[in-house]
Image (spheres, rainbow, N blue to C red):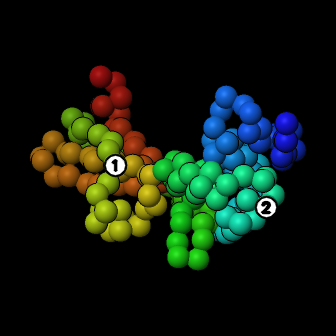
Amino acid sequence: MLLRSFGAMTIDPSADRPVYKQLADLIRARIEAGEYRPGQRLPAESDYVAEYGISRDSVRRAIAVLRGEGLIVTELRGSRVRDAGEAVTVPIAPGAQVTARMPTEPERRQLGIAEGVPILVVTEPDGETRKLPADRTIIEASKEQQEV
């Protein structure tokens, strides 16, 4: 059995968990540990293939998982850790409704959010709606709303 490791974490091709999910776990752990910082490019697919002895398809699937989670963005020149930006607090009026959903491609471009990041749709009592990136928005209910 061939095990490839990162610290205490390994990729075990004979494990029940698919190899691409194991690699996604390793990369996620590196992001969470600060080894890969916001804006930093990830190693190339070929680097992961060589380091862990896994297929290019497994690497691509792992990258797709992390992109779907909103942790990374993939551009023409490779993938990098997404910079979530500074969070903004948005007050909502009593009676406002907040829903979450995945954005359309034009909404994603307009709001400047990565693939895999949902949006919050705030519908005010007067019917006005706002679309906000869920990864950097803090919703603050007014005092009257909190007491209900």
Residue 75, percent from left and from top? 52, 72
- Identify residue for label 2: 50
Among the two numbered marks 1 and 2 on one chain, the one whose residue lies closer to the N terminus = 2
Residue 81, percent from left and from top? 62, 61
Residue 67, percent from left and from top? 52, 55
Q: Amino acid at mark 2?
A: Ala
Q: Nearer the viewer, residue 57 or 29?
A: 57
Report if the CB atoms under discs 1 and 2 are less than 8 Å apart.
no
- Residue sitting at the far left: 126
Residue 69, percent from left and from top? 52, 48
How far apart are the alpha carbons under marks 1 and 2?
35 Å
Q: Nearer the viewer, residue 103 or 62?
A: 62
Taking the spot 63% from the left edge, 45% from the top edge, the residue there is: 20
Q: Amino acid at mark 1?
A: Met
In the picture, the disc for residue 102 is 1
Q: Nearer the viewer, residue 54 or 101?
A: 54
Which part of the image, by quadrant, shows the N terminus?
A: top right
